[in-house]
Every structure is written in structure tokens, then in C-alpha cells.
């Protein structure tokens, strides 16, 4: 697959990757220093790295950047004091509808209660065999096995999108359409650009993608509604969902499903790539996991602590407040550096070691508090199935010594860009 001409999806992935790359500095070393010398920094740290951040949506607003575990937890858990509504600013039509991540207060609570059951383990486990494990095993890994070598990032780029489309209930016999939708979803992620020359074109492409995805999803929602919403797919379940007498209309379901595509694809791609890199760099550990599959979920959790894909989260102060003696005025942006909090030495012993045996303790790779990732069980199930399938079907999988070693990079949307492996 890796020698084939780049598809539209692979090209957009490369654009997103370079956009969020940041500089080549050793970020973990910088974060360790910031935790000691300037844990509540006045300013937008990501902007200084040249990485687009929603904290800069209004350049006139003051910004503060947090590096310590306790401070990040304090902000993420208190959604009334540190709000998310600003996320809807500046993105126009994309936010015309049900965008959970940009909701606050009762509106968020009520919506979350309505949607949550659709993403609980009970439901996801029912989807696991056919719509997750079956798809990964039969459509992706089985055809790859005779090749005996691959760039695993090619697989990682496609399987999460294919799985989420299968859960959503898109027709599975139209692979070209699915690739097109995926490229649209990535164009939305590539929308925010620091370079003004690129910004206008990227925003235009993102807005076109937003419109095209809306139309495509709305058609499927209408079909499922006409069938009575009795299916077991995500859209049918959203049609059936109810909380305190409230249910969702077609526009809300369409905009919610559209928001899932950028939320569910890229994040899972990079998390799987990072997990595989960390295991392949440590063959003894990989062997342990191969022989004891109860370690798979521990390895996933630890990789999400050690190298989270979503490296920072931003909130806005609803009132004047103070963190570690630094005054934060009402309206200021507060940028929480998750990659730093997840390695805080005051909380984790040997924080810079990838240790799947460490005592479980919350980290922020899926967020924390009321906005914590609603799809985390879907993501973990997918990654669990993908790792198990790779271990089952690719004997003695190891890094390809004839190719460059993988590197986990990027100041935002972190992960490896290539991951060349061979097997027997
Ligand atoms: C490994 C993969 C994933 C990672 C690392 C990830 C990460 C995150 C994070 C950090 C947040 C918190 C955002 C915030 O606090 O503002 C979040 C929220 C969210 N995620 Fe995920 N996510 C992943 C996969 C998924 C999947 C598979 C889905 C859907 C099936 C999904 C849907 C969502 C939604 C809808 C929200 C908004 C929740 C809310 O605001 O209440 N994510 N995700």
C-alpha cells in the first residue's frame, strides 16, 4: 500500500500533520522546565510554537497556559467556572447545530444525558464483533498478511474511519464515498492555519467540506427515519434516543454525526500509531503483551497518558479567578497542556517512563470532567481489536531495520508519521 500513489486522504493527512507540527524542540524537556519555573504562564504557549490554537480565536483576549496536573484537573473538571462556548466562535456553519464540545451548563448536561447511552460499553460491545473486530480483521489485516511488510500508518489512517462509518450505518458497499467523506472530515481539521496566506484557502475548503458532509449525512438520517429508526446503527440509535421527553430532530442528528467524523478518525489513527511505536521500540514488552492479552488495555491507557494525541485543551474563565497566585481575569483563555500534566513528576512516579504496570490514575488524554470524550469506549475498543489482530495475524512483528525508525512528533495532534514493520 505504501508504494501506491498518495490518495486524497493521505495528502490531506500530510497537510494536517505538518500544520500541527510545531518546532523540532524536545517538548517534554520544555514542559518539565515550565512545570518548575513557570507553571502558570501568561501568554499562549502554542502560539509561540507557531501551532494554531483555538486560544487565539480573539487576539485581544488575554491567555494563560497551565502545565501542572492539579491545575489542569481543576480547570477541566469545573465547567461552570471554565467554559467551552467560545469554541463555536469563528467557525460559522460548522457550529450550526448540535456540537457537544462547544456547549455549556444545562444545555450540555441535557444533551450529554441524551447521547451518553449510545456510547456506553453495553452498546459498543454489541457492535464489537461485526462492526469493529470483523471489519479490522477481514477488510484490513487479512489482505495485508501475505505482504510481510507494511507502513502500519497506512492501515491506521483508514481503519478508524471505516469503523466509524460502519457504526454510523453508512452503506458499506461504497468505499470511494467513504474515502471522500474522510477527506472532507480532515479538511475541517486543516481549517485553522497560522500562515495568513494559507488560512483563507484552508477555511474555504473546510467550509465546503462542512456543507458537503452535511448533505451526505442528512440523506442517510432521512432514510433511517423513514425505516422507523429501528436499526442497530448509531444513527438509528440517535433517532431512538430520549431524555426527559426530549429527542433529536434530523438537523441535530446530522450535525452531531458530522462533528464525530473529525473527532473519531484522526485521534484514533494517531493513538494507535503511538501505541504501536511504543511497543515495537520495546520488543520484550511487546512479547509480554502478545502472551498476556489482559495487558492490552493497560498498554492503551499508558500510551494515552505518556503521549496523548490531543496535547492541549482550552477553556475560557467565566469569572475573575486565581490559579497558583496568578490572577486570571474573566474572559481570559486558559490553555491546559495535557502532555505536560500527564507527565507531572509530583503525581506520577518515573513519569517519563512508559510503564504499563503503573498504578492506574486518571490522566487527561481523553479530557476530564463533563466534556470527557464521549467516544472513549469506542476508541479503546477499536484500538484493542486492532492491536489484538496485529498480534494474532502478523507473527514476530518488528520494526523494519531497512527503513527509518518511527518518531512520535508534533506539538498538537501528536503521533508518528510512518511506522514501517516486517513480520514472518
Ligand atoms: C483515541 C481516540 C480519541 C481521543 C484521544 C479523543 C480525545 C477527546 C478529548 C481530549 C475530548 C475532550 C474535549 C474537551 O474537553 O473539550 C474529546 C471529546 C469528545 N470526543 Fe473524543 N477522542 C477520541 C475518539 C473519539 C471517538 C471514537 C468519538 C466518537 C465515536 C469521539 C467523540 C467525542 C465527542 C463527541 C466529544 C465531545 C464531548 C463533550 O464535549 O461532551 N472521540 N475527545
Image (cartoon, rainbow, N blue to C red):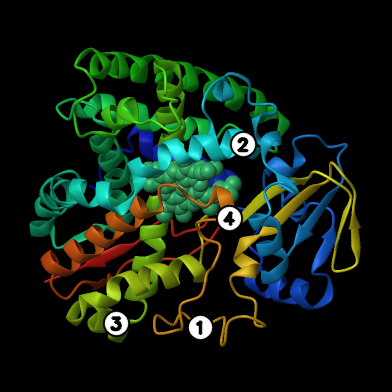
Ligand 1 is within 8 Å of the C-beta of the residue at disc 4 = yes
Residue identifier under label 2: 106
Say which of 264 and 127 sits in front.
127
Q: CA distance from mark 3 to mark 4?
A: 36 Å
Q: Check residue 353 in the rendering and tell me which mark sits there, or answer none.
A: 1
Q: Are marks 3 and 4 in contact (CB under 8 Å)?
A: no
Q: Given this view, does label 1 or label 3 mark the residue nearer the observer?
A: 1
Q: Residues within 10 Å of mark 2 (few under 14, many from 20)?
A: few
In percent of width and height, residue 2 lies at 27, 49
Say which of 413 and 403 sits in front.
413
Residue drawn at the location 42% of the way across and 23% of the way down: 248
Q: Who comes first in sequence, dot 3 or dot 4? A: 3
**The residue tagged with tag 2: helix, strand or loop?**
helix
Q: Check residue 369 in the rendering and tell me which mark sits there, or answer none.
A: 4
Residue identifier under label 3: 283
Q: Given this view, does label 4 or label 1 mark the residue nearer the observer?
A: 4
**The residue tagged with tag 1: helix, strand or loop?**
loop
Q: Are marks 3 and 2 in contact (CB under 8 Å)?
A: no
Q: Check residue 187 in the rendering and tell me which mark sits there, or answer none.
A: none
Amino acid at each position: 500500500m505504501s508504494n501506491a500513489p498518495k490518495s486524497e486522504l493521505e495528502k490531506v493527512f500530510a497537510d494536517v500533520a505538518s500544520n500541527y507540527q510545531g518546532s523540532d524542540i524536545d517538548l517534554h524537556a520544555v514542559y518539565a522546565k515550565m512545570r518548575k519555573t513557570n507553571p502558570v504562564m501568561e501568554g499562549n504557549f502554542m502560539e509561540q510554537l507557531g501551532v494554531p490554537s483555538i486560544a487565539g480565536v480573539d487576539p485581544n483576549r488575554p491567555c494563560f497556559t497551565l502545565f501542572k496536573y492539579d491545575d489542569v484537573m481543576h480547570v477541566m473538571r469545573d465547567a461552570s467556572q471554565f467554559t467551552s462556548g467560545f469554541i463555536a466562535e469563528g467557525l460559522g456553519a460548522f457550529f450550526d447545530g448540535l456540537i457537544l464540545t462547544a456547549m455549556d451548563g444545562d444545555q450540555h448536561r441535557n444533551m450529554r444525558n441524551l447521547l451518553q447511552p449510545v456510547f456506553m460499553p453495553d452498546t459498543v460491545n454489541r457492535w464489537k464483533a461485526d462492526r469493529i473486530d470483523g471489519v479490522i480483521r477481514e477488510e484490513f489485516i487479512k489482505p495485508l498478511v501475505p505482504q510481510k511488510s507494511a507502513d502500519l500508518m497506512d492501515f491506521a489512517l483508514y481503519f478508524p474511519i471505516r469503523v466509524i462509518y460502519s457504526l454510523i450505518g453508512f452503506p458499506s458497499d461504497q468505499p470511494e464515498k467513504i474515502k471522500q467523506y474522510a477527506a472532507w472530515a480532515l479538511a475541517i481539521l486543516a481549517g485553522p492555519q497560522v500562515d495568513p496566506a494559507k488560512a483563507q484557502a484552508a477555511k474555504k475548503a473546510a467550509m465546503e467540506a462542512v456543507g458537503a458532509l452535511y448533505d451526505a449525512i442528512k440523506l442517510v438520517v432521512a432514510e433511517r427515519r423513514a425505516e422507523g429508526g429501528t436499526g442497530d446503527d448509531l444513527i438509528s440509535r440517535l433517532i431512538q434516543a430520549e431524555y426527559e421527553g426530549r429527542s433529536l430532530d434530523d438537523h441535530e442528528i446530522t450535525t452531531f454525526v458530522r462533528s464525530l467524523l473529525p473527532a473519531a478518525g484522526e485521534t484514533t489513527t494517531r493513538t494507535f500509531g503511538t501505541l504501536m511505536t511504543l511497543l515495537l521500540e520495546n520488543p520484550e514488552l511487546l512479547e509480554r503483551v502478545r502472551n498476556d492479552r489482559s495487558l492490552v488495555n493497560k498498554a492503551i491507557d499508558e500510551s494515552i497518558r505518556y503521549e496523548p494525541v490531543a496535547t492541549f485543551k482550552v477553556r475560557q474563565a467565566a469569572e475573575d479567578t486565581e490559579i497558583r497566585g496568578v490572577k486570571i481575569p474573566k474572559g481570559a483563555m486558559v490553555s491546559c497542556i495535557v502532555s505536560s500534566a500527564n507527565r507531572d513528576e509530583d503525581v506520577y512516579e518515573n513519569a517519563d517512563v512508559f510503564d504499563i504496570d503503573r498504578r492506574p490514575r486518571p490522566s487527561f488524554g481523553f479530557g476530564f470532567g463533563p466534556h470527557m470524550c464521549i467516544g472513549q469506549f469506542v476508541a479503546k475498543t477499536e484500538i484493542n481489536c486492532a492491536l489484538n489482530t496485529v498480534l494474532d495475524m502478523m507473527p514476530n512483528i518488528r520494526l523494519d531495520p531497512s527503513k527509518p525508525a518511527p518518531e512520535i512528533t508534533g506539538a498538537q495532534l501528536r503521533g508518528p508519521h510512518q511506522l514501517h514493520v516486517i513480520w514472518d
